Amino acid sequence: MDNQMINKSLAELSVGLQSGKFSSVELTQFYLDRIASHDSELNAFITVTAEQALATAKTADEKIASGSASGLTGIPLAHKDIFCTDGVKTSAGSKMLDNFIAPYNATVVEKLKSISMPMLGKTNMDEFAMGSSNENSYYGAVKNPWDLDRVPGGSSGGSAAAVAAKLAPIATGTDTGGSIRQPASLTGITGIKPTYGRVSRFGMIAYASSLDQGGVFASSAADSALLLEAMSGFDAKDSTSVDIPVPDFSTTLNDSLKGLKIGLPKEYFEEGLNSEVAKVIEAAIEEYKKLGAEIVEVSLPNTHLAIPAYYVIAPAEASSNLSRFDGVRYGYRCEDPVDLTDMYMRSRGDAFGREVKRRIMTGTYALSAGYYDAYYLKAQKIRRLISEDFQKVFEKVDVIMGPVAPETAFKIGEKSDDPISMYLSDIYTIALNLAGLPGMSVPAGFANNMPVGLQIIGNAFTEGKMLNVAHQYQQATDWHKQTPSKYAVSEGEK
Amino acid sequence: MEWETVIGLEIHAQLSTKSKLFSGSSIEYGQEPNTQANVVDLAMPGVLPVLNAEAVRMAAMFGLAIGAPIGRGNVFARKNYFYPDLPQGYQISQFDKPIVELGHIDITLEDGETKRVGVTRAHLEQDAGKSLHEDFAGMTGIDLNRSGTPLLEIVSEPDMRSAKEAVAYMKKIHELVQYLGINDGNLQEGSFRCDANVSVRPKGQEEFGTRAELKNINSFKFVERAINIEVERQIDLIEEGGEVVQETRLYDPDKNETRSMRSKEEANDYRYFPDPDLLPIEITDEFLEEVRKTLPELPDVKFKRFVEEYDLSEYDAGVLTANIATADYFESVAKSADAKLAANWITGELSSHLNKEDLSINDSPVNAAMLTGLIKRIEDKTISGKIAKQVFEAMWNDEGGKDESTADKVIDAKGLKQITDSGAIESIIDEIIANNPAQVEQFQSGKDKVFGFFVGQVMKASQGKANPAQVNQMLKDKLSA
């Protein structure tokens, strides 16, 4: 198998498979081998499903041979370990579900399985998607492929690291407050969180139901467009999924950006943004001007309220969502409980990590009698204000741009005892989860030798436009083609 | 001191949908444990609820039937608490925005007066599973078949003033939900359950006393007993200088007592909040109009119509409209046979047979068509009322088939047809007169009483089949000649 494989786009891989240049079994084995050689240091995978992947690859090859394949058939991928996979451990990064074999497939998993995309494995994540560094995993921290001493971001850090180090050509993730965009930014890859309701949440273990949304990690906007399209669509099993058609995202990738109006919210460039990061973002904006875009300064005045509102709403929902983990039907149960209360307390006490407990307690408090109005209801009001801020801006612009994160990847352990500083790393990503809007991270350069992502925010259900905007930038630059040298294969190398 | 009782009821009526409120599992009763629980009912990680539209329609029907506004953007909320038979760790219910808002229902009191009882609200919610304490030494088994079954919780205003009123209200709701076809009315299987909030106050006092909530009172009889015993307890307590505390109490029917389950302080903080997995239920005018069209005739309306249209007594109309099956049975008979006879037969012979064998009218061996056939033969004098009872008995015991001709077949087979041929009756009378000269003499000397003897003899000789009116007339003519 040709090592150049890792530099190929999904479209190129698809052509290779369809033309018989290589088989899905070969391609899948190639990635399984890369996982075997590199994952011990990255810790990107919780479970590697080699046998299953090869079986699906075999089916894919048969479909390709019989002409019943679709474009993505045979292309392997990794799933964040938050998506339920029938017959395979689904841990959500928690000791609570270390013994949990899901009895069904999430809709996203089912959709991609039905077109025979081999699943390489399940990727590491912050426990129950709570975290911005991937240090909150029962399975240990994930390393950033650009610097093994640094975090890859979170909560979908495993998927991000796997794609950045080319252990998988593409991967799924989920984003509740930035969990796709922030790790994509920190590992120098492309990530998209679509509009709330675009991708089914059925089978995606809930953290904060009104904010959670599945999405994509890939090496480019073009690759993202293909996987996102395959994942999207109304699902009768998810009452919050939206019944509108999924466009062919790939057909609009090459639309011209002439006259595109880009809004730059002043609040995203104020104090707290690392100056090196700011320079990268400014350079990216310059590039867009060259592509014919027009820059409009805008304001999202309630930005500073996003983090406090999020840290009421998300924990409130989480405190309820995580009540089902009680040791009764599945998951961890403490040894020799003396009575029911003892079973609840020790099972949950032993199996949930510190951050999860912190959020359950915060959320329980916020929903308690006497505090509900002051916390939960007020946070919901702020949520509406934030939404209105965005809608006002979208009357004037096509997309909003800014940084994804105020800083590049920090050192493992650097912020783990300082939850507030950790929470602040999501300052630019959280607001659009509250508003239900789609957002992307696109590699835009480096600051202090670590990757920096440019955030593109669109109005609801304008993923096609955002992917077009990102793709045009990637046609003009090659930041998205950078791979950490350790995991790269230079041209001409076999 | 004179005391007044104040009662409010919370009724949980299981909706007669095919599947659960938020999953496709069947709600059929009495299946093997955990065979009717899918991944959603088990609250597996990642699953999501999807609302059963049929349950919404049924709740809306109930709202329309009690004259209540239907919440146009009603919302599901999570009621959070831990219990092993509550797999999600929360119950999906409705809190500040229920589907059915303030309505009312009229009950008839013992003195015949009508009283209006307010229905504060009715909301949709999921039932919990069951904890099984037998067969598991030192452990508890969990059966989730019932988990997620749709319930309509119907909450009354504190408008009842006696246990009897409470029972009348409960019966009225019980009757109504069955009329609407939204509940099977089965108290034994728990598909119609009741909790009662009970307090007492000195007569004349406006503010309510402290209430106790009585749980687990699942029959009309127990509701009455539980309330009475609780009222007695509260009055005794206050009169002895004590104070009623707000608490939940369990009724024990074996000991006929209530005992404390948990106090207000131990009550859960349920942390209600809107369920983010479900959108508000938008109710449109068109939808309500559709539901309105499917509403059956309601009990009170039917009652009035029975009195007017069939000229029935209020008593008979009341018995016949007490449940929709009986009312339908009656109307099926009365459409082609005499209504008063139909009413008499249904409230008399049929009821007593059903009661004796503990059968519901739907399971009656004598169906409406069979009774129609029988009553027609009484009307056209083919048989007398007395003979009709024999025919009924035979039909009850499955003789002669199952349709309107059954009565005729029984009458033919048993030769029960009434003798109306005056020649035949005359010859019997002549024979009796000839054989009883002494009694003839008595009659002719003025002893009218002996006339009954002759009637009896003629009927006996005809095996009860002679038309009694004809017998009377002809005997009178002959004896007075």
Image: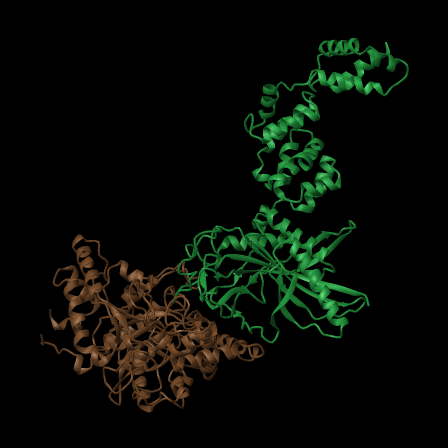
Chain colours: A brown, B green
Q: In the rendered image, which quarter contains the C terminus of chain A? A: bottom left
**Quick check: B276 left or right of B8?**
left
> Is B254 in front, or is B365?
B254
Compared to residue A413, the image places residue B374 above or below, namely above
Residue A152 lies, with reference to residue B157, above or below; the image says below
Q: How many marks?
A: 0
- Residue A440 lies in what quarter of the image? bottom left
Q: Can residue A278 be seen by looking at this rendering? A: yes
Give me the residue at 79% from left, 8% from top.
B434
Task: Locate residue B240, reporting x and y percent.
Answer: 76, 73
Residue beneath the point at 35% across and 88% down: A415
**Residue A210 seen in this snapshot:** no
Residue A397: percent from left, percent from top: 40, 75
Q: Quadrant of residue B49?
A: bottom left
Percent across and percent down for residue A193 are 35, 72
- Which quadrant: the N terminus of chain A? bottom left
What percent of the width, then of the height, locates residue B274?
A: 52, 69
Instruction: Pick the residue in front: A45 or B229.
Output: B229
Q: Is residue A50 left or right of residue A211?
A: left
